[in-house]
Image (tube, rainbow, N blue to C red):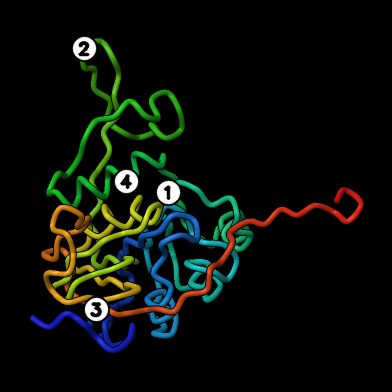
Amino acid sequence: MKKTFPDAAAALEGLLFDGMTICAGGFGLCGIPERLIDAIRDSGVKGLTVVSNNAGIDNEGLGKLLRTRQIAKMISSYVGENKEFERQYLAGELQVEFCPQGTLAERCRAGGAGIPGFYTKTGVGTQVAEGKEEKVFDGETYILERGIRADLSIIKGWKADEAGNLVFRKTARNFNQPMATAGKVCVAEVEEIVPIGSLDPDGIHLPSIYVKRMIVGAPYEKKIEFRTVRTREAA
């Protein structure tokens, strides 16, 4: 099965529709599927529910889809660097489901493993627990969290072979791996595709069975999520 496509638009052809749920990999601006996000923006698909650790920053990453008002709901754990996210949320234009970061990763992992729900202590006694089933195990209270399944997963990898076995680089592994398994279809953009047999089998982070389509997205420009500089006087 040929998995490599010439560009992001071709790789997403036939997969996008209004109102769909998308799991998007990445951690801050690290390991985000930039080319696939651009193609989703250009497609004009709308009413999206997007599951991601965060929503990018203003006009970078998923922030581009917020600017074009294509996202109706975000399921996220951190959104502190995105002013447009804040504006839309406070104006009632964007639905938001906040989820603790570890719980979000586990919800996606569970969904990918066919587990519909699990109990966790994280969030007990806080707003996170509101409306959720509680259960006591060994004298401790836990809340029920649902596994997440998406119509589509978009992820960013470092290197893949032609079969779709994939390796992530450092921090980019955090959310890309569980997000990849949670989607009915996973599309990956990578920096390099190598011949089958080039990757060490023990070093593969995501087996090819999860990856249905791939593109090479390189070259990439290194973006900084939040920059702090000294004033001239302080220097």
Q: CA distance from mark 2 to mark 4?
A: 25 Å
Decide: few, some or many residues near mark 3? Use Cα within 10 Å; few <14, some 14-19, many ≥20. few
Q: In the image shown, does 142 or 102 lie closer to the viewer?
A: 102
Residue 3 on image: x %, y %: 16, 80
Residue beneath label 4, please? 105
Query: Eyeballing the image, is 137 above or below 202?
Result: above
Query: Eyeballing the image, is 135 above or below 171?
Result: above
**Mark found first going from the N terminus, 1 or 4:** 1
**Mark found first going from the N terminus, 2 or 4:** 4
Residue beneath label 2, please? 138
Please tell me whether mark 3 sits on a helix, a strand or a loop.
loop
**Mark found first going from the N terminus, 2 or 3:** 3
Please tell me whether mark 2 sits on a helix, a strand or a loop.
loop
Residue beneath label 1, please? 97
Q: CA distance from mark 4 to mark 3?
A: 24 Å
Question: Of the numbered discs in the image, which one, if any, rests on residue 15?
Answer: 3
Do labels 2 and 4 touch, CB within 8 Å?
no
**Mark found first going from the N terminus, 2 or 1:** 1
Residue at left 57%, top 62%?
A: 57
Decide: few, some or many residues near mark 2? Use Cα within 10 Å; few <14, some 14-19, many ≥20. few
**Mark found first going from the N terminus, 4 or 3:** 3
Please tell me whether mark 4 sits on a helix, a strand or a loop.
helix
Residue 25 on image: x %, y %: 36, 60
Q: Nearer the viewer, mark 4 or mark 3?
A: 4
Q: CA distance from mark 1 to mark 3?
A: 24 Å
Residue at left 28%, top 15%?
A: 140
Residue at left 52%, top 76%?
A: 68
Q: What residue occupies the far right of the structure in this picture? A: 233
Question: Three-letter amino acid code at disc 4?
Answer: Ala
Residue 163 on image: x %, y %: 13, 73
